[in-house]
Amino acid sequence: MGDIRDWRPFVYGGMASIMAEFGTFPIDTTKTRLQIQGQKTDRSHSELRYRGMTDAFVKISRQEGVKALYSGIWPAVLRQATYGTIKFGTYYTLKKVATDRGFLHDKAGNENLWCNAACATMAGAISSAIANPTDVLKVRMQVHGRGTSDVGLLRCFREIYVHEGVRGLWRGVGPTAQRAAVIAAVELPVYDFCKLQLMETFGDQVANHFISSFIASLGSAIASTPIDVIRTRLMNQRRVHQLQHSMTPATTTPTTTAPRLYYTGSLDCAVQTVRNEGFRALYKGFIPTWVRMGPWNIIFFITYEQLKQFY
């Protein structure tokens, strides 16, 4: 891989991430819609509008137009330009550092799984925390679909900043970093491991990259979906005002209390979700998550491996 200051893993990682995002974004939109529906605490999303990924895809297309499936694509691209670039560049750079210091490989020359996972975890958590505002914008625009078609990225950013402050842009940063760390810790080492094991059969070819990325996506989808549900709900929530009627008989004018959030944090969101909707609610959107992760990883890793040919 060359010098640890090599810029190519960062650039190639970002380019491959953007390509994968464009190719799979409509699936991500259906996943987001499935994850936010059925909330007992948030009346605006209490209705179960979609029965599954296919039903969501068809209804969104018919009711809001195909364009609604791409609501939030530009913050998603911006996210990948930052998150994808930093994550994959940092991961391979950390692996190079670990290799140079003798931590990554054992005496037989095999990669140490725990060291590999640690590099991936650090890269995922750091990059996702930095890119969190773009994730918040993406989720908000995906949830509202057609309603954001005339808003645009900059206006959506301004509305969040004005009404919710800087903290609104980093809403859900905790589970976002946790999710990214889990995905990276599972996905990247599993991909590298599978690729190495399949090298004798397929060589360093597209077939190897395809199978390895598909296997890696299943593991990361199983591990990350509950965190992803919590992250999506935290990012989508806004501070709400509750109407409270006066107790004095002279007036019946309702007054509003101080704005509050439906969920106070990751743990509160998880507890309320399980209590009100059952444990299975933590796996809402699992099918589109896996269906998207498969093609996303396939597009990413194949693109990344082809770009590496320029090394």
Image: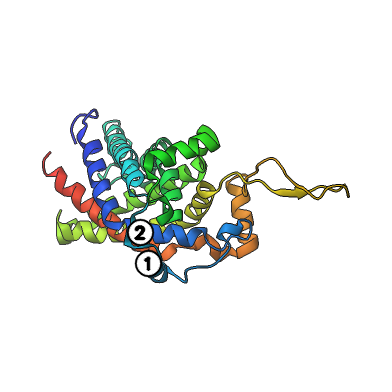
Q: Is residue 53 visible?
A: yes
Crowd class of label 1 (few under 14; some 14 to 19; many from 20; radius 10 Å): some
Q: Is residue 217 visible?
A: no
Q: Is residue 230 above or below residue 106?
A: below
How far from the left and from the top, in percent, is residue 239?
A: 60, 44
Quarter of the view holding residue 221: bottom left
Q: Is residue 76 above or below residue 99?
A: below
Crowd class of label 2 (few under 14; some 14 to 19; many from 20; radius 10 Å): many
Direction left: furthest residue: 310
The residue type indicated by label 1 comes to Phe
Residues 83 and 27: in front is 27
The residue type indicated by label 2 comes to Leu
Asked if marks 1 and 2 touch (Cβ < 8 Å), the reply is yes
Residues 203 and 221: in front is 221
Q: Tell me the residue at 46%/57% (across/down).
A: 225
Marks 1/2: CA–CA distance:
8 Å
Taking the image as shown, residue 304 lies to the left or right of residue 138, namely left
Q: Earlier in the sequence, mark 1 or mark 2?
A: 1
Residues 144 and 278: in front is 144
For the N terminus, give its image quadrant: top left
Instruction: Quickly name the residue at label 2.
Output: 69
Q: Secondary structure at mark 2?
A: helix
How far from the left and from the top, in percent, is residue 43?
A: 61, 59
Instruction: Quickly name the residue at label 1.
Output: 57
Q: Tell me the residue at 25%/44% (across/down).
A: 109
Q: Secondary structure at mark 1?
A: helix
